[in-house]
Image (cartoon, helix red, strand yellow):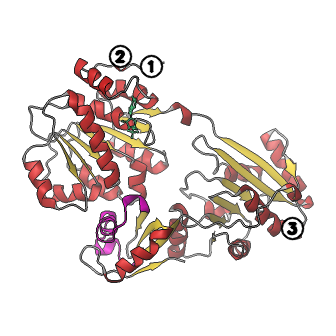
Amino acid sequence: MASDSFSSLSISAEQIANLESLGYKKMTPIQAQSLPHVLKGKDLIAKAKTGSGKTAAFGIGIINLINPRFFGVQALVICPTRELADQVGKEIRRLARAVPNIKLVLLCGGKPLGPQIGSLEHGAHIVVGTPGRLQDHLTKGTLKLDGLKALVLDEADRMLDMGFAEVMEDIISYTPKSRQTMLFSATYPDTIKQMSRTIQRDPVTVTVESEHKESVIEQLFYEVKKHERNSTLLALFEHYKPETTIVFCHTKIQCDEVASMLRDNKIEALAIHGDLDQRERDKVLVRFSNNSCSVLVATDVAARGLDIKALEAVINYELPRDPEIFIHRIGRTGRAGETGLALSIYTPSDVMRLNAIEKYQKKPCVSDVPESLDRDPSFTLVPPMVTIQLDGGRKSKIRPGDILGALTGDAGLSGSQIGKIDIFDMSSYVAVERDAARQVLSYLADGKIKGRAVRARKVR
Ligand code: AMP
């Protein structure tokens, strides 16, 4: 067990005194696990959320390796949004009080370039910024990273979600290979693992304890008559009120029918199956993954390979024949230490399938009747976000930063009102908070993105 006292670290007495003056009495779990490695110069993957003390987990490391007498950028922190960059900049400045003459420059979009160039010319040791603007400075040659010792990707999963993968790759290509790379992420999907493999060397992985817990999936089975499937499905939604759900069906027709039945009952659902063409499929997946659709009704084949984060519930509209498929389906809920809900509807003629599942799991299936569900008939499921489609994408050189910049700049939204941004060849999708949709559409009716008018519409 690592010590949680800052004095156990090889940092200066001045820094320890500074931490004390900030009221940091002991390390948070993420700091206690990361800092010993960070201070040794190791690459790091840390699964940690904002609020865990993650900024100091890399900030103390960065400050320790800066040579204030060398006037070049020695550490770079890339953040998904301006708000986070501001917050990170402030925290690092507080930590840097322990060392005289450390200069930190913020390079975020939405601000004029001139003063940023001026600050860089005066010499900066640490740069904190957002991807698009960092890339602009690198392209112009106003930011040089030849002497970089440490690179931090903060909220890396969010940056990938926002479509910044290529921009980050480009930024990293300007940095020396000898750098120390620290990757912070709240979730740990395959895309992050993949990214780590290409940009890190033998990284130490750190996860805070609360997220170590094994995931728990609560399984419940409801026996119904054949004609009661739909009413039972509604009863499950009205009782459990899950915010993100996949409903599994056997056939394409069933998927369409179930999705439309749910929509008729004010539960925003979309069907995904093999009959959709690639564009329709992309659109459905974009909407589900950016929180502008709460329920996906899918066949097993269509759900294969979906890169979807923790779902609150998986509902089996019918039990699959193969118990292995059942396990695979329900494994999509309850990720990352959260409790997941696996609800299954079956008819008396499916009892063989139920027995097969019991045998496979070596435990009895807990059955209940739909009448036991206490229902909230006023329940509706309106997703928190709305997807706006823009006519313009990779082919017209639109980058996530351009969209983010236009919406947080001229359109007047705050970064937190904007969700995932997906860029395709010919179009882009941006999720915005439901209440902000009208503001965005009215701005885009005559406003511009990257100096160009783009047509925008709400995806329905
Ligand atoms: P972060 O997760 O980096 O956004 O940090 C969350 C908050 O915790 C910030 O306000 C920090 O100033 C504060 N903080 C970070 N480390 C410690 C610590 N060891 N003890 C007390 N507060 C801390």
User: If you read the primary sequence from the N terminus, does the residue marked by circle 1 or circle 3 appear first?
Assistant: 1
Q: Does the magenta stretch include residue 205?
A: no
Q: Nearer the viewer, residue 372 or 423?
A: 372
Span shown in magenta: 390-419
Dots 3, 2 in contact, CB < 8 A: no
Q: Residue 259: image x %, image y %?
A: 69, 72
Alpha carbons under labels 2 and 1: distance apart: 9 Å
Res 382 → quadrant: bottom right
Instruction: Write the residue at 58% across / 67% down.
Output: 293
Instruction: Write the residue at 40% across / 70% down.
Output: 424
Using the image, tell me which numbered label, if any, was put on residue 2.
Answer: 1
Q: Can residue 442 be seen in this view?
A: yes
Question: Would you call the spot at circle 1 few (<14 residues within 10 Å), some (14-19), or many (20 or more)?
Answer: few
Location of mark 3 (residue): 228
Label 3's element? helix
Dots 2, 1 in contact, CB < 8 A: yes
Judged by depth in the image, the label closer to the viewer, 3 or 2, is 2
User: If you read the primary sequence from the N terminus, does the residue marked by circle 2 or circle 1 appear first?
Assistant: 1
Label 2's element? helix
User: Label 3 sits on what residue type?
Assistant: Glu
Instruction: Write the residue at 41% across / 58% down.
Output: 416
User: Label 1 sits on what residue type?
Assistant: Ala
